[in-house]
């Protein structure tokens, strides 16, 4: 963001985020340090939210470019001609509405289209599963999580990716907070 938006508040937000990141995760920090880190992160998010609001068009266009680049690098080769055309048409529409409050709706639809295309790929589903099971604390019921993880591993071992898709959906339903489409796309894109 700092390369495309000139706002002195970016340096302050970066400094606060770096302060929070400075806690050594191998040492058990004291409560005061943890609280200070949380406060710094809160302040950084608050500053970034203000910057995002003040520079909505520029930020929206950056988000759109990021989405389009992701689609181009990871999903375009798997998209049908009609899916590619629909994505490009929606991207043009989103660009026209970059200053509009409804922009997020267009961007979310672009990410959804990208996700739908990638979700048909076995390697993507396996990566999504592996990424999803990294932290049991993200789930409301650790027992159900463990059972789903075991079931998913068996699906991978058996090469049953269609069943693995169902396991991934169940894992998403069990999460404490629902993942957004773009967070689900942040799977390691290295194919097995």
Image (cartoon, helix red, strand yellow):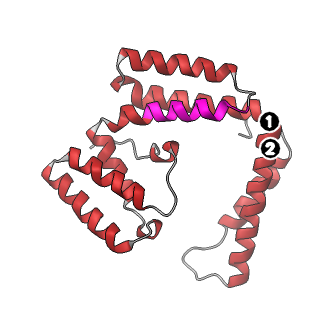
Task: Look at the numbered disc 1 and give the secondary structure of its residue.
Answer: loop
Say which quarter of the image contains residue 149.
bottom left
Q: Residue furthest right?
A: 8
Residue 73, x across and y down, in percent: 44, 29
Badge count: 2
**Quick check: 155 left or right of 140?**
left
Q: Quadrant of the C terminus?
A: top left
Tell me the magenta residue range. Answer: 101-114
**For this view, does 156 lie left or right of residue 96?**
left
At horizontal 45% and vertical 42% (from top left) the residue drawn is 185
In the picture, the disc for residue 146 is none
Distance, label 1 to label 2, CA atoms, is 6 Å
The residue carrying pointer 2 sits among few (fewer than 14), some (14 to 19) or many (20 or more) residues within 10 Å by Cα, namely many
In this view, the residue in front, 178 or 128, is 178
Q: Nearer the viewer, residue 103 or 131?
A: 103
- In the depicted view, which residue is nearer to us: 50 or 23? 50
Residue 40 appearing in the image: yes
Name the residue beneath numbered marker 1.
Answer: 55
Residue 77, percent from left and from top: 36, 23
Q: Position of residue 32 (x, y in %)?
A: 73, 82
- Position of residue 176 relative to residue 104, above or below, is below
The mark found on residue 51 in the picture is: 2
Query: Which of the 4 image quadrants contains residue 25?
Result: bottom right
Which is the main secondary structure of the residues drawn in magenta? Answer: helix
Q: Is residue 94 left or right of residue 177?
A: right
């Amino acid at each position: 963001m700092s390369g495309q938006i000139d706002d002195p508040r970016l340096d302050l937000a970066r400094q606060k985020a770096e302060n929070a990141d400075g806690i050594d995760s191998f040492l058990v920090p004291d409560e005061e340090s943890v609280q200070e880190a949380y406060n710094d992160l809160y302040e950084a998010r608050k500053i970034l939210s203000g910057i995002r609001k003040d520079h909505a068009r520029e930020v929206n266009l950056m988000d759109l470019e990021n989405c389009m680049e992701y689609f181009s690098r990871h999903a375009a080769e798997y998209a049908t001609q009609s899916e590619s055309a629909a994505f490009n048409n929606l991207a043009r529409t989103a660009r026209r509405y970059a200053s509009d409050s409804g922009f997020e709706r267009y961007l979310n639809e672009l990410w959804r289209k990208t996700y739908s295309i990638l979700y048909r790929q076995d390697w993507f589903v396996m990566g999504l599963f592996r990424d999803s099971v990294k932290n049991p604390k993200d789930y409301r019921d650790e027992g159900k999580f463990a059972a789903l993880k075991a079931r998913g591993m068996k699906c991978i071992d058996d090469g049953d990716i269609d069943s693995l898709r169902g396991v991934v959906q169940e894992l998403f339903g069990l999460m404490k907070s629902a993942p957004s489409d773009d967070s689900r796309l942040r799977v390691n894109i290295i194919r097995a």
